[in-house]
Image (tube, rainbow, N blue to C red):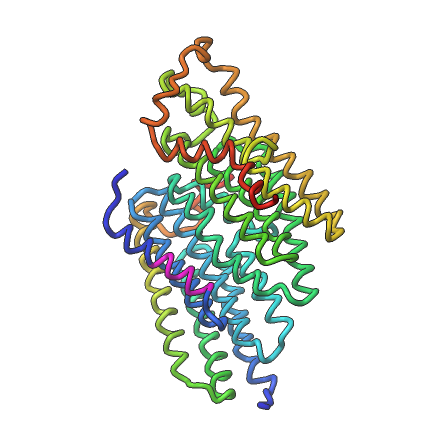
Amino acid sequence: MTFPISYFLFFCTLLTGTSLSICSSSWFGAWIGLELNLLSFIPLIAIKLCPYATEAAIKYFLIQAMASTILIMSSSMHMFSNDFSYILITLSLLLKLGAAPLHFWFPQVIEGLTWPQAFILLTIQKLAPMFLISYLTYSSNLIFMITLAAILSSLIGALGGLNIMKLRKLMAFSSINHMSWMLIAMTINDMMWLTYFLFYSFISGSVIILLHSTQTYSISNLMNQNKNSSILNLLLPLNLLSLGGLPPFMGFSPKWIMIQLLSSKMMIFSLLVILFSSLITLYFYLRIFIPMILLSFPSFSSLLKIKSLWAFSPFLAIFTFINMFGLCLPIPFSI
Amino acid sequence: MVSFSSMMVFIPMVMIFCGMWGFITYNKHMLNSLLSLEFMMLGVFWLMSIQLTLVGSEIYFSLFFLTLAACEGSLGLTMLILVVRSHGNDVFSSFNLLEC
């Protein structure tokens, strides 16, 4: 994959903006970091003159600029009224994140991107607002707001993905659903949501590498895969089941930790809502690959070329290996 | 402790909410959205100047703010040029390629 040299510069300033807003001790510094993040992500999206990318860049720019304006406004009126300004800051960060009551821009923006840009939007762009929200969990009002956003985003991420045929929108809704786990973890513990985020970004990265290497953008593209890549047809279900959180795979372990944590804190209601909605997301992951398995060729099982996987992409092999055996990862720590 | 009179904060807040009202409702053209975004930024600048003056903090913080607001405005104008080159106009109802 070739990319222009300016990508590197903008990617560096993107990471600089994220780390600046995480490390800053004032809301003004956090605002500067978020602005730097926004200003360097727009050129990464709109590097080609294509109507889809342009539209995604415009929608992303207007939403994020409004959210950061609200953030700097409410941090300026912080001394005037304390509670109201923190509520506004939380709302603007939820808008930047794309969490549930304010999620409407997120599937539309991700539809216009290519897979690597979608990966940046799904993981790195989430990092700074999530850290800033996790700094805000000290008063019971804000914790109530974040819990409400978590429950709503689990429901919307589950129900919104049911009727979607485009894989990028589907990844967006699954990301909204996973964000609900992170938000509910944020109200309990600072470390847990970061663990969940790392696991989630790893698994979604493996799915996105797989889909990017075959240039798949919708479910109908998956049916027309050519025969030589039948090993990829085997790998995609495994990665998607890991994203859904089935037990033999890696994606189960952060959910396991979270279920343990929430039930020890007696937050049974929110745990039930989030668990049921992630069951629904498992349904739409299954709907992606079950037609693909059923409609594949009869010679599928005899033509598996195991050796070609390593030659195809070493990253893919490593990612898939960790995805399948990653559940054994916490075992050394638990003994 | 500095005592804030509520009017000093209230008037810039009215300005910001007018800008937000314009941003949300009057969005036939994209230029209108960019202008109301800048209007909101101007209101925030007013609010921030009042706060910084009253606190006795250093006023040049607002220069950092103005620099970044100007960067954001110029990026908005760049997006305007980009959308005129790709879509042919800047009317929001023509940006419907990505809807659900």
Q: Position of residue B60 (x, y in %)?
A: 38, 82
Please indicate whether residue A119 sits to the left or right of residue A140 in the image. Answer: left
Please indicate whether residue A57 sits to the left or right of residue B15 in the image. Answer: left
Please indicate whether residue A152 sits to the left or right of residue A249 in the image. Answer: right
- Looking at the rendered image, the quarter that the C terminus of chain A falls into is top right
Q: Is residue A81 above or below residue A201?
A: below
Q: Identify the residue at horizontal 56%, vertical 76% (top origin).
A: A77
Dominant SS type (magenta) = helix
- Looking at the rendered image, the quarter that the N terminus of chain A falls into is top left
Q: Position of residue A74 (x, y in %)?
A: 55, 71
Chain part drawn in magenta? A13-22
A122 drawn magenta: no
> Where, by quadrant of the figure, is residue B78 drawn?
bottom left
Q: Is residue A6 above or below residue A208?
A: below
Front one among A300 and A224: A300
Q: Position of residue A48 (x, y in %)?
A: 29, 45
Q: Identify the residue at horizontal 56%, vertical 66% (top origin).
A: A89
Q: Position of residue A207 (x, y in %)?
A: 46, 35
Q: Identify the residue at horizontal 35%, vertical 69% (top origin).
A: B70
